[in-house]
Amino acid sequence: NAGVMQNPRHLVRRRGQEARLRCSPMKGHSHVYWYRQLPEEGLKFMVYLQKENIIDESGMPKERFSAEFPKEGPSILRIQQVVRGDSAAYFCASSSGQGVYEQYFGPGTRLTVT
Amino acid sequence: SQQGEEDPQALSIQEGENATMNCSYKTSINNLQWYRQNSGRGLVHLILIRSNEREKHSGRLRVTLDTSKKSSSLLITASRAADTASYFCAPDQTGANNLFFGTGTRLTVIP
């Protein structure tokens, strides 16, 4: 039973380029969460999605960031026109439900903007 | 703040000793979860304690929850070098869609 998969593991982008981060949840999980972690800090919630729906995007920056979780395929976190401040580790987690459910985390994608 | 706040920020102990980490939060919760993060890796779920539970055990881990004080503690007994990691508490806030993480306790176990 594969865990949460994220790719790429490392991504280097120049300022102004686009970054696409992918997350495949655990089998049977339909709830996906994206978090961002800056160096020496905890994880900050960005967005919560279910299949084809954004449930809560209260942690997403208003501009340049978007997320989707299509009916088929992985969840995508997209960052347009990246800036150096976007450099961070981005973690995806999945759960089988909402509420009293543990979240299973992927290994993360480390984005470096040069 | 909606997030859990771990204390201490860093803890260094000898192998074989016990390690205790504390977490405080400010809102009502459904449950509280503890996670571990090894350097450069994703988080690993350790244990979940529900709001109506006071204590829970899992192997060498013991978690307590005091909802009246809005606090939790994680005890790791007979620590090992492999326990070296950052530990985060995540209160599952009532009505929230996500977990709120603090900055963690960085535990170093010296062989």
Image: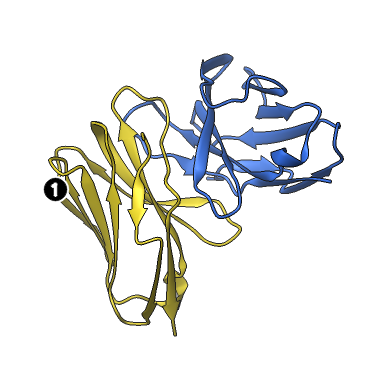
Chain colours: A blue, B yellow
Above or below, B92 relative to A58? below
Question: Image quadrant for the C terminus of chain B?
Answer: bottom left
Above or below, A53 relative to A113? above
> In the rendered view, does A17 fall on the left or right side of A72?
right
Q: Locate residue A21: give its quadrant.
A: top right
Residue B34 visible here: yes
Q: What residue appears at the point 64 percent right and 35 percent down from the top-left corner?
A: A23
- Residue B85 location, x and y as percent? 47, 64
Find the residue positioned furthest to the bottom: B111
Above or below, A51 relative to A91? above
Q: What residue appears at the point 54 percent right and 45 percent down from the top-left corner?
A: A3
Q: Nearer the viewer, residue B13 or A25?
A: B13
User: How many numbered circles does the render carry?
Assistant: 1
Q: Nearer the viewer, residue B90 or A113?
A: A113
- Chain bearing tag 1 is B
Residue A74 visible here: no
Residue type at mark 1: give it.
Arg
- Residue A54 location, x and y as percent? 55, 16
Q: What residue appears at the point 65 percent right and 42 percent down from the top-left corner?
A: A6
Answer few, some or many: residues within 10 Å of disc 1's Cα (few below 14, many 20 plus, some between 14 and 19): few
Q: What residue appears at the point 14 percent right and 38 percent down from the top-left corner?
A: B52
> In the rendered view, does A94 fall on the left or right side of B62?
right
Find the residue positioned furthest to the top: A53
Considering the numbered disc 1 on the image, is that residue within a helix, a strand or a loop? loop
Question: Image quadrant for the N terminus of chain B?
Answer: top left
Badge 1 is on which residue? Answer: B54
> In the rendered view, does B83 fall on the left or right side of B59?
right
- Residue B65 location, x and y as percent? 19, 48
- Residue A50 location, x and y as percent? 52, 20
